[in-house]
Structures are given as structure tokens and as C-alpha cells.
């Protein structure tokens, strides 16, 4: 059964990081995505079919320095609802594929632009990576221990949460509006904007004086509270504790044998947190991680094992929900979220660059002779 985006046609100009993540999200949900790989770009050359971010699309490799290749992209645009690009401002304009040109060819087109700093502002042309956008959003400063430098949360926040996922949300919003108005538009998705937006709740806490924005390691969600953090176990592995609410906190203390310790009664006294965390740390060191998992197995205390990426797919909950799928030997996260009536299909392995070039060109009405000519001229690789 096709996914909820079945019938949506998307042109994705190949890039790295958040733009292909957005393309993957749309493809997972049933959109027909044609990825235009740029001739000479080698960022995927060594990834092969293990590059999960490229799953679910058809691919054509074009030399976008040639006018005839640009015309092929514009023909795809004429037949599409969405275009995704992930370059710095003005790059697509220099290629002859800017929004004005594309919207002239397809007035209902939603033109999605994924960039670090956005299409305007003093940093618009500056280079950057996830950590840079995270730094300016206020998020990075809040991550990590008080006496250590801030700790980057991989590249999950700016690249994928604040970037690719925010772009996908924006595209679907604009598609919905285009259905009613008959007019497309540009979606300017910046990783810096998205990183800031993900901090909305915490900026609210700052306004309510429930969060110290200048200090790290003193707030209840940053790992400093004894009831919200990660503890080392006897085998060197870790257990995650999120026992914020009083009923969960009580069960945490009961399983750890600390219910009689009167000092733990003052759960929200931050001055006691270092001592309480030290006591809990000593307790967790007395058993292995999996022994603690068994101890908490029948207690609703918000305590979980910290799994690595080999262990996570084998967890019984993930197995039951099929949160990970094995597609031709490649274990990867399954499409999310779930739809009861129009579920997403199990993703196949990513296809090689240019594997569907003939199919894509034929869909534009080009015959075999013309396709062969384009290959001989180096327009199609």
C-alpha cells in the first residue's frame, strides 16, 4: 500500500546532511523523489548502498554546467510539486535553477531551500556545520558538565532535527497552501533557525526563572540532577535515569535501596544534587547494567539501559514495533511516524548514482537515441 505522500513528485538536487535527510523522509512516506546527482561530486562515491540517507529515490547524474542538463532539471520541475536544494545562497541561481526560473516553469512549485544560516542575514554566505548553528542558538552552551566545555550532541540537533526535519515540515505546509491557492513559494529553512526553535521550551523556562541560562550543569534536564542523568555500572556500561515526577523518583529510590535516606527527600534542592548524585553513582556501580535492567523491569521508574547502535535494533521493544528494518542485509531505522491506513513501505537499499537515468529521461519523453546522445555528450553520466 502506498504511503501518505503517494503522488507527490519531488526533485532533489543532491547535497549532504539535512537536504538528503529531508528527501529520505518524503520518500519514506511514498513521495516519488528523483535525486539529481551532480557529475563530478564524489561525496557518495565510497558510501555505496550503505548510505541510508539516500534510500527510496531514483537517481540521475547530470553535468549541471551544461545548459542541456539544466533544461532536463527544468523539465523535471515542470512535472513536480517540490524541489529541494541544500547549497549556500545564490548557488542555484548561478546554475540557472533559481526559484524565479523554476516557478516560472511550474507556478505551483514549492521550492525548498536548506542552508545553515538562511537566505538572508550577515552570516548567510558564511560556512558552517551543525556545531556552529547549535552554538549561536543558545543550545550548545546548555549541554555538558559544569566544569567541562559544552558537549556536542553528535549532529542530530541542527543538521537533522532543526534542518532536514524542519524543511520537510515546511514543504508539506507549503504544499497544503499551494493546493488551495494554486501558487507555489520558496521555503527558506535554516539550521540556525531550526536549532533555536527546538529550544522553545527552555527559553520559556528561562523567562519563568526555572532555568539558569548562564550556567551549565545546574539545571534539571542537563544531567546535573540526580534523578535525571546517566550512571556507570559495574561492567562499565551505563544506565539512564529520568525519574522526574515524584512517583517515579520514589520507585528509583526504592529499587536502589535509598528510600530511608532522608537527604533524598529534598528532591528539588539543587544544593544537595552533587551529594545525592554521588550516592546514586556508588549504588549503580554495585551491579552490571543488565542486572539493573532486571531490577527495574517491573517498576515504572523511567530507567533504561544505554544501548549502543549494535544493541538497539535487537531490543525487544524495537523488534515488536519493527523500529529497525533489515533491507537486503542493511539494518537501518524504519520510516516514522506510523500511519494506520497508509503505512510507509519497508525501504529498499539506496540505489547507485545514476542507476535510473534512462527511466527518468524516458519519463520526460526522450527516446533511446536522444538519451544515448546525451550520454555521448557527457550531459548524462
Image: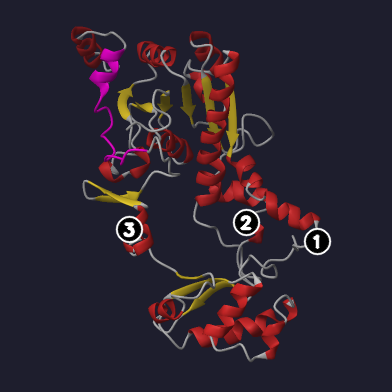
Q: Tell me which segment is drawn in magenta.
A: 344-363
Q: SS class of the residue under badge 2? A: helix
Q: Quadrant of residue 274?
A: bottom right
Dot 1 or dot 3: first in sequence order is 1
Q: CA distance from mark 2 to mark 3?
A: 33 Å
Query: CB of mark 1 within 8 Å of CB of mark 3?
Result: no
Quadrant location, the N terminus: top left
How many labels sit on residues? 3
Q: Which numbered dot is residue 209?
A: 1
Answer with the quarter of the image where residue 209 lies. Answer: bottom right
Q: Is residue 345 inside the magenta stretch?
A: yes
Q: Would you say residue 70 sits in the magenta stretch?
A: no
Q: Secondary structure at mark 3?
A: helix
The residue where tag 2 is placed is 140
Decide: is 16 above or below 153.
Answer: above
User: In the rendered view of the protein, which quadrant contains the C terminus?
Assistant: top left
Residue beneath label 3, please?
319
Q: Position of residue 226 (x, y in %)?
A: 62, 77
Q: Position of residue 288 (x, y in %)?
A: 40, 82
Where is residue 147 drawn, in percent x and y? 65, 72
Q: On the rendered structure, is 87 left or right of 117?
A: left
Q: Secondary structure at mark 1?
A: loop
Residue at image position (53%, 46%) is 161
Decide if residue 306 is in sight here: yes
Camera-side residue of 143 and 202: 202
Residue at position x 70%, y 78% in the image: 267
Amino acid at each position: 500500500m502506498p504511503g501518505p505522500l503517494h503522488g507527490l513528485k519531488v526533485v532533489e538536487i543532491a547535497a549532504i546532511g539535512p537536504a538528503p535527510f529531508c528527501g529520505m523522509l518524503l520518500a519514506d512516506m511514498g513521495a516519488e523523489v528523483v535525486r539529481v546527482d551532480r557529475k563530478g561530486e564524489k561525496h557518495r562515491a565510497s558510501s555505496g548502498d550503505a548510505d541510508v540517507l539516500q534510500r527510496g529515490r531514483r537517481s540521475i547524474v547530470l553535468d549541471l554546467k551544461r545548459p542541456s542538463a539544466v533544461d532536463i532539471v527544468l523539465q523535471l520541475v515542470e512535472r513536480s510539486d517540490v524541489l529541494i536544494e541544500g547549497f549556500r545562497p545564490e548557488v542555484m541561481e548561478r546554475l540557472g535553477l533559481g526559484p524565479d526560473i523554476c516557478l516560472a516553469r511550474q507556478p505551483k512549485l514549492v521550492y525548498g531551500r536548506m542552508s545553515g544560516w538562511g537566505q538572508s542575514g550577515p552570516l548567510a554566505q558564511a560556512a558552517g556545520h551543525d556545531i556552529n548553528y547549535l552554538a549561536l542558538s543558545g543550545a550548545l552552551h546548555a549541554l555538558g558538565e559544569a566544569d567541562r566545555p559544552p558537549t556536542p550532541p553528535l549532529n542530530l540537533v541542527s543538521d537533522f532535527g532543526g534542518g532536514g526535519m524542519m524543511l520537510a515540515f515546511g514543504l508539506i505546509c507549503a504544499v497544503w497552501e499551494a493546493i488551495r491557492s494554486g501558487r507555489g513559494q520558496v521555503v527558506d529553512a535554516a539550521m540556525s533557525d531550526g536549532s533555536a526553535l527546538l529550544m522553545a521550551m527552555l527559553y520559556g523556562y528561562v523567562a519563568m526563572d526555572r532555568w539558569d541560562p548562564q550556567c551549565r550543569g545546574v539545571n534539571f534536564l542537563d544531567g546535573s540532577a540526580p534523578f535525571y542523568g546517566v550512571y556507570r555500572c559495574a561492567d562499565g556500561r551505563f544506565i539512564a535515569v529520568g525519574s522526574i515526577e515524584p512517583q517515579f523518583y520514589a520507585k528509583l529510590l526504592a529499587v536502589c535501596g535509598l528510600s530511608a535516606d532522608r537527604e533524598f527527600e529534598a528532591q528539588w534542592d539543587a544544593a544537595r544534587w552533587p551529594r545525592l548524585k554521588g550516592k546514586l553513582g556508588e549504588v549503580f556501580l554495585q551491579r552490571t547494567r543488565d542486572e539493573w535492567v532486571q531490577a527495574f523491569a517491573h517498576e515504572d521508574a523511567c530507567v533504561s539501559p544505554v544501548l549502543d547502535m549494535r544493541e538497539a535494533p535487537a531490543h525487544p521493544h524495537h523488534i515488536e514495533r519493527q523500529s529497525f528494518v533489515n533491507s537486503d542485509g542493511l539494518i537501518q531505522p524504519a520510516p516514522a511516524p506510523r500511519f494506520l491506513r497508509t503505512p510507509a513501505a519497508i525501504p529498499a537499499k539506496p540505489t547507485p548514482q545514476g542507476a535510473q537515468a534512462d527511466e527518468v529521461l524516458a519519463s520526460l519523453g526522450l527516446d533511446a537515441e536522444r538519451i544515448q546522445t546525451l550520454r555521448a555528450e557527457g550531459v548524462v553520466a
